[in-house]
Image (spheres, helix red, strand yellow):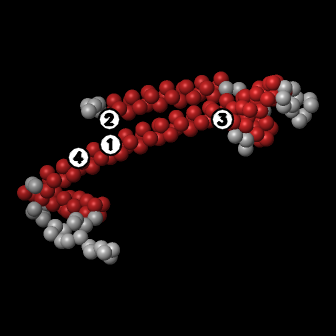
Amino acid sequence: MSSKTLEERVGEMAGDFMRRIEAVMEALTNTSRPPAELSLRVRHLPDVRLRRDIARLRSGVLQPRDPSVKAGTLADDLDKELACRLLSRQILAQVAYMHDLLSSEMESVSADMKENALAAFQAWNDLPEARDTTTALSASVRRLHRLLHEEQGRSKRKGRPAAASSIR
């Protein structure tokens, strides 16, 4: 198990995220965009259909509806549309990866904090001052106990049988 501190892990994640974001930004600047009106017309078409149409346009089997548009130009524009779609999927994958990594790290930190808080609570609860109802420590221990009880719910009573099932 890694013995890195939280600050070291956050620093590594920040560096990783920055590299990923820079790669996405570079891809965004290097990817040429298709004409906006083309994107609106082919938005609903699947990638397979676009690739097939590109190949058919380049081979001359398919001709554009508008005779003023060359088949090669339209094929290039459709290629740009496919590149933009691929880039958007890559961006979504990077965002999902960063979200998952951050979520797991936050859960890990939360679990560590909860474990430390429970250990501190148990240590305070064992002190003699915690049993004296007139001390501030006793009041703090009671508040913590109430919060813990609210979060965890009622404890299971030992020795009681489980509720009888209605299925026999």
Q: Give the amino acid at mark 3.
A: Arg
Q: Earlier in the sequence, mark 4 or mark 2?
A: 2
Q: Earlier in the sequence, mark 1 or mark 3?
A: 3
Residue 153: mark = none
Q: Position of residue 8 (x, y in %)?
A: 33, 30
Can residue 108 be seen by looking at this rendering? yes
Residue 116: mark = 4
- Judged left or right of residue 18, residue 47 is right
- Judged left or right of residue 19, residue 119 is left
| Residue drawn at point x = 14 percent, y = 56 percent | 125
Q: Quadrant of residue 168?
A: bottom left
Q: CA distance from mark 3 to mark 4?
A: 46 Å
Instruction: Describe the element under mark 3 as helix, strand or loop.
Output: helix
Q: Earlier in the sequence, mark 1 or mark 2?
A: 2
Can residue 33 be seen by looking at this rendering? no
Residue 109: mark = 1
The quadrant of the picture occupied by the N terminus is top left
Q: Position of residue 127 (x, y in %)?
A: 9, 54
Q: Give the amino acid at mark 2.
A: Leu
| Residue drawn at point x = 25 percent, y = 59 percent | 148
Q: Which residue is mark 2?
A: 6
Q: Give the amino acid at mark 1.
A: Val
Within-10-Å neighbours for mark 4: few <14, some 14–19, many 20+ = few
